[in-house]
Amino acid sequence: MDIVAWILIIAFFAIAFIGLIYPIIPSVLFIVGGFVVYGLFYSFSELPWWFWLIEILLVVLLFGADTVSNLIGVKKFGGSKAGMWGSTIGLLVGPFVIPFAGILIGPFLGAVIAELLITKSDWEQALKTGVGSLVGFLTSVVTKGILQAIMIILFVIAI
Protein backbone atom coordinates (compact mmCIF):
# COMPACT_ATOMS: atom_id res chain seq x y z
CA MET A 1 0.00 0.00 0.00
CA ASP A 2 2.96 2.31 0.55
CA ILE A 3 3.73 2.27 -3.16
CA VAL A 4 0.13 3.13 -4.07
CA ALA A 5 0.07 5.96 -1.54
CA TRP A 6 3.29 7.53 -2.82
CA ILE A 7 2.28 7.13 -6.46
CA LEU A 8 -0.94 9.03 -5.70
CA ILE A 9 0.84 11.72 -3.68
CA ILE A 10 3.47 12.28 -6.37
CA ALA A 11 0.79 12.27 -9.08
CA PHE A 12 -1.16 14.96 -7.21
CA PHE A 13 1.98 17.08 -6.88
CA ALA A 14 2.85 16.60 -10.57
CA ILE A 15 -0.67 17.63 -11.64
CA ALA A 16 -0.28 20.75 -9.50
CA PHE A 17 2.79 21.76 -11.52
CA ILE A 18 0.99 21.00 -14.79
CA GLY A 19 -1.64 23.44 -13.52
CA LEU A 20 0.94 26.22 -13.79
CA ILE A 21 0.76 25.84 -17.55
CA TYR A 22 -2.94 24.95 -17.76
CA PRO A 23 -4.61 27.35 -15.31
CA ILE A 24 -7.94 25.54 -15.55
CA ILE A 25 -6.34 22.94 -13.25
CA PRO A 26 -6.60 24.14 -9.63
CA SER A 27 -2.95 23.58 -8.69
CA VAL A 28 -3.19 24.39 -5.03
CA LEU A 29 -6.06 21.96 -4.53
CA PHE A 30 -3.94 19.15 -5.95
CA ILE A 31 -1.10 19.95 -3.57
CA VAL A 32 -3.51 19.92 -0.62
CA GLY A 33 -4.96 16.73 -2.11
CA GLY A 34 -1.51 15.15 -1.88
CA PHE A 35 -1.40 16.07 1.82
CA VAL A 36 -4.86 14.57 2.34
CA VAL A 37 -3.86 11.35 0.57
CA TYR A 38 -0.86 11.12 2.90
CA GLY A 39 -3.08 11.67 5.94
CA LEU A 40 -5.58 9.04 4.79
CA PHE A 41 -2.93 6.39 4.10
CA TYR A 42 -0.75 7.15 7.11
CA SER A 43 -1.91 9.67 9.71
CA PHE A 44 -2.80 13.32 9.85
CA SER A 45 -1.21 13.49 13.31
CA GLU A 46 2.22 13.01 11.74
CA LEU A 47 1.89 16.46 10.19
CA PRO A 48 2.49 19.05 12.95
CA TRP A 49 0.41 22.16 13.59
CA TRP A 50 3.11 24.50 12.21
CA PHE A 51 2.97 22.61 8.91
CA TRP A 52 -0.78 23.20 8.54
CA LEU A 53 -0.48 26.85 9.57
CA ILE A 54 2.24 27.60 7.01
CA GLU A 55 0.44 25.62 4.30
CA ILE A 56 -2.80 27.53 4.86
CA LEU A 57 -0.95 30.83 4.53
CA LEU A 58 0.71 29.62 1.31
CA VAL A 59 -2.66 28.49 -0.08
CA VAL A 60 -4.03 32.00 0.48
CA LEU A 61 -0.97 33.47 -1.24
CA LEU A 62 -1.38 31.10 -4.20
CA PHE A 63 -5.03 32.03 -4.69
CA GLY A 64 -4.12 35.70 -4.75
CA ALA A 65 -0.98 35.36 -6.91
CA ASP A 66 -2.86 34.98 -10.22
CA THR A 67 -5.15 37.92 -9.79
CA VAL A 68 -2.54 40.26 -8.37
CA SER A 69 0.11 39.41 -10.98
CA ASN A 70 -2.32 39.84 -13.86
CA LEU A 71 -3.69 43.09 -12.42
CA ILE A 72 -0.22 44.55 -11.86
CA GLY A 73 1.00 43.48 -15.30
CA VAL A 74 -1.97 44.99 -17.13
CA LYS A 75 -2.06 48.16 -15.01
CA LYS A 76 1.71 48.77 -15.25
CA PHE A 77 1.43 48.80 -19.02
CA GLY A 78 -1.54 51.19 -18.99
CA GLY A 79 -4.34 48.68 -19.48
CA SER A 80 -7.92 48.93 -18.26
CA LYS A 81 -10.25 46.55 -16.42
CA ALA A 82 -11.43 45.35 -19.80
CA GLY A 83 -7.85 44.42 -20.66
CA MET A 84 -7.53 42.50 -17.41
CA TRP A 85 -10.76 40.60 -18.04
CA GLY A 86 -9.79 39.92 -21.64
CA SER A 87 -6.45 38.59 -20.47
CA THR A 88 -8.11 36.31 -17.92
CA ILE A 89 -10.54 34.93 -20.48
CA GLY A 90 -7.70 34.44 -22.96
CA LEU A 91 -5.70 32.64 -20.30
CA LEU A 92 -8.52 30.16 -19.71
CA VAL A 93 -9.53 29.67 -23.36
CA GLY A 94 -6.15 29.96 -25.11
CA PRO A 95 -4.68 26.55 -24.21
CA PHE A 96 -7.75 24.78 -25.54
CA VAL A 97 -7.99 26.74 -28.80
CA ILE A 98 -4.26 26.75 -29.56
CA PRO A 99 -2.57 23.82 -27.77
CA PHE A 100 0.86 24.61 -26.26
CA ALA A 101 1.25 28.18 -27.56
CA GLY A 102 -2.26 29.17 -26.45
CA ILE A 103 -1.10 29.62 -22.87
CA LEU A 104 1.02 32.58 -24.03
CA ILE A 105 -1.01 33.79 -27.00
CA GLY A 106 -4.40 33.59 -25.23
CA PRO A 107 -3.84 36.21 -22.51
CA PHE A 108 -2.04 38.49 -24.95
CA LEU A 109 -4.80 38.34 -27.57
CA GLY A 110 -7.54 38.53 -24.93
CA ALA A 111 -6.10 41.74 -23.50
CA VAL A 112 -5.51 43.28 -26.95
CA ILE A 113 -8.99 42.43 -28.23
CA ALA A 114 -10.67 43.70 -25.05
CA GLU A 115 -8.74 46.97 -25.21
CA LEU A 116 -9.60 47.48 -28.88
CA LEU A 117 -13.27 46.52 -28.72
CA ILE A 118 -14.38 47.64 -25.29
CA THR A 119 -12.24 50.64 -24.38
CA LYS A 120 -11.60 51.69 -28.01
CA SER A 121 -7.86 52.03 -27.32
CA ASP A 122 -5.46 52.57 -30.20
CA TRP A 123 -3.33 49.70 -31.49
CA GLU A 124 -0.21 50.84 -29.66
CA GLN A 125 -1.92 50.94 -26.26
CA ALA A 126 -3.72 47.65 -26.89
CA LEU A 127 -0.43 45.94 -27.74
CA LYS A 128 1.21 47.41 -24.62
CA THR A 129 -1.63 46.01 -22.54
CA GLY A 130 -1.19 42.61 -24.19
CA VAL A 131 2.51 42.62 -23.31
CA GLY A 132 1.64 43.62 -19.74
CA SER A 133 -0.77 40.73 -19.56
CA LEU A 134 1.91 38.34 -20.76
CA VAL A 135 4.44 39.72 -18.25
CA GLY A 136 1.85 39.36 -15.48
CA PHE A 137 1.09 35.77 -16.44
CA LEU A 138 4.75 34.76 -16.60
CA THR A 139 5.42 36.43 -13.26
CA SER A 140 2.48 34.53 -11.82
CA VAL A 141 3.76 31.19 -13.13
CA VAL A 142 7.18 31.73 -11.59
CA THR A 143 5.74 32.94 -8.28
CA LYS A 144 3.26 30.08 -8.03
CA GLY A 145 5.92 27.54 -9.00
CA ILE A 146 8.18 28.75 -6.20
CA LEU A 147 5.34 28.74 -3.65
CA GLN A 148 4.25 25.24 -4.69
CA ALA A 149 7.82 23.97 -4.41
CA ILE A 150 8.06 25.49 -0.91
CA MET A 151 4.79 23.76 0.06
CA ILE A 152 6.14 20.38 -1.08
CA ILE A 153 9.52 20.93 0.60
CA LEU A 154 7.74 21.76 3.88
CA PHE A 155 5.71 18.57 3.48
CA VAL A 156 8.89 16.51 3.05
CA ILE A 157 10.46 18.20 6.09
CA ALA A 158 7.34 17.62 8.19
CA ILE A 159 7.16 13.91 7.47
Image (tube, grey):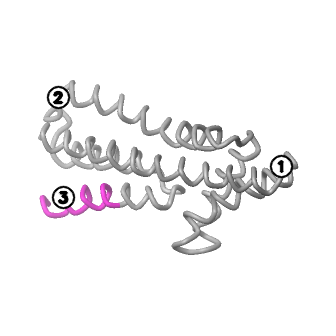
Where is 86 relative to 7, above or below?
Answer: above
Q: Quadrant of residue 14?
A: bottom left
The residue pinned by badge 1 equals 121
Q: Name the spot of residue 57 as percent of width and height, x first.
A: 36, 28
Q: Name the spot of residue 2 as percent of width and height, x first.
A: 12, 58
Q: Secondary structure at mark 1?
A: loop
The residue pinned by badge 3 equals 6
Query: For the point 41% across and 46% down, which residue is it?
Result: 29
The residues bearing labels 1 and 3 have C-alpha atoms spaced at a distance of 52 Å
The residues bearing labels 2 and 1 have C-alpha atoms spaced at a distance of 53 Å
The residues bearing labels 3 and 2 have C-alpha atoms spaced at a distance of 20 Å
Mark 2 or 1 closer to N-term?
A: 2
At label 1, the amino acid type is: Ser
Q: Residues within 10 Å of mark 3 (few under 14, many from 20)?
A: some
Query: For the point 57% across and 54% down, which residue is it?
Result: 134
- As for residue 5 lying within the magenta part, the answer is yes
Q: Where does the N terminus fall, quadrant-wise?
A: bottom left
Residue range highlighted in magenta? 1-14
